[in-house]
Image: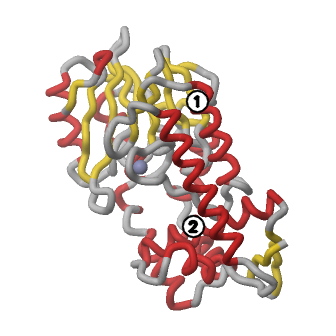
Amino acid sequence: MDELEGGIKRITLPLPTRPGHVHTYLLPGDDGWTLVDTGVGLPDAKETWAAALEEAGGSVATIFVTHFHPDHVGAAADLHELTGAPVYQGVLDYAQCELVWGNPAWSERLLDWFHLHGTPDDVTAELVGQSSVYRPFIRYQRDPILVEAGEHVDGWELVAAPGHADGQLCLLKDDVLIAADHLLGRITPTVGLWPASRPDPLGDYIAALDRTIELAPKIALPGHGDLIDDPAARARQLQEHHRLRLEETVTALGPEPRTGYDLSFDLFGAKLQPAGRRFAVAETLSHAERLVHEGAALRHEDGGTVTYTAA
Ligand SMILES: [Zn+2]
């Protein structure tokens, strides 16, 4: 447990996959802690949390989930049982949480979607199999209190941070941004196009980074990695990263139709494990779709396959 400025405590939990850890935060409030994010619902999550909260002292008044990815939402139900505190989650984010984790047919949908984007059969099975690894360890809280950007939770303003997840919400107070996976220090947050996601996640993300630059918080507390002491500068770096990636994508496109799977080899190389390839395809597609929205690429759907060409 780390003590941060403003009485905030950071509890870092291990993750079985990269980046190997996730940060959760205890924000001080009049009625007790607001606990932001929960880690994965590993079998010993409750014991781990009981020990951490005992060390922190005081009681948890509110549990807040920034987005529905396993490392952030996974132990929400365990924490609710342990503390009795209500769980708050964004409206759109909870809808996607149910669609993905509350839906036994989701794997099937993901299979179809990777096929649609040109992934060979044998590879598709591998990619989707990999994505089920976390499924048993996700115990999200049913029927949480639904909130939206602009509302306040325990004095913290909720700020929309779409891109990494469509419905991700950050918290802002006194120039401190609890950033979740919107801004990360050394890693670039993945921004992918997934089935049932918003149509232009990269466009959403670039606009959300503009908002971060405008808000100009003094510090950002991310879901992974070091504290970010110049969030606006980091937001500009991430915009620049995607500008270059968009250029690479334009360069890879020509008159010959190419699928997202195929293009992902140009953008992310050939040497990727199935989990890496899964994100590479989704991320390539978010760039291709951004180009379609900018008028720099064309999307075609033909015989059950989506392809892109230069405009
Ligand atoms: Zn994360």
**Side (left or right) of 223 relative to 168:** left
Q: Nearer the viewer, residue 46 or 21?
A: 21
Marking on residue 106: 2
> Tag 2: residue type?
Trp
Circle 1 residues within 10 Å: few <14, some 14–19, many ≥20: many
Which x, y percent locates residue 246?
66, 62
Residue bearing the label numbered 1: 159
Q: Nearer the viewer, residue 60 or 173?
A: 173
Res 77 visible: no
Q: In the rendered view, tell whether residue 119 sits above or below residue 58.
A: below
Q: Dot 2 lies on which element?
A: helix
Which numbered disc, 2 or 1, marks the residue that appears first in the sequence?
Answer: 2
Quarter-of-image position of residue 94: top right
Which x, y percent locates residue 176?
44, 23
Q: Residue at x 42, y 74 (%)?
A: 130
Distance from Cα at disc 2 to Cα at disc 1 = 28 Å
Which x, y percent locates residue 71?
38, 50
Q: Residue at x 82, y 77 (%)?
A: 300
Circle 2 residues within 10 Å: few <14, some 14–19, many ≥20: some
Identify the image quadrant of the C terminus: bottom right
> Tag 1: residue type?
Val
Res 69 visible: yes
Identify the image quadrant of the N terminus: top left
**Side (left or right) of 172 relative to 58:** right
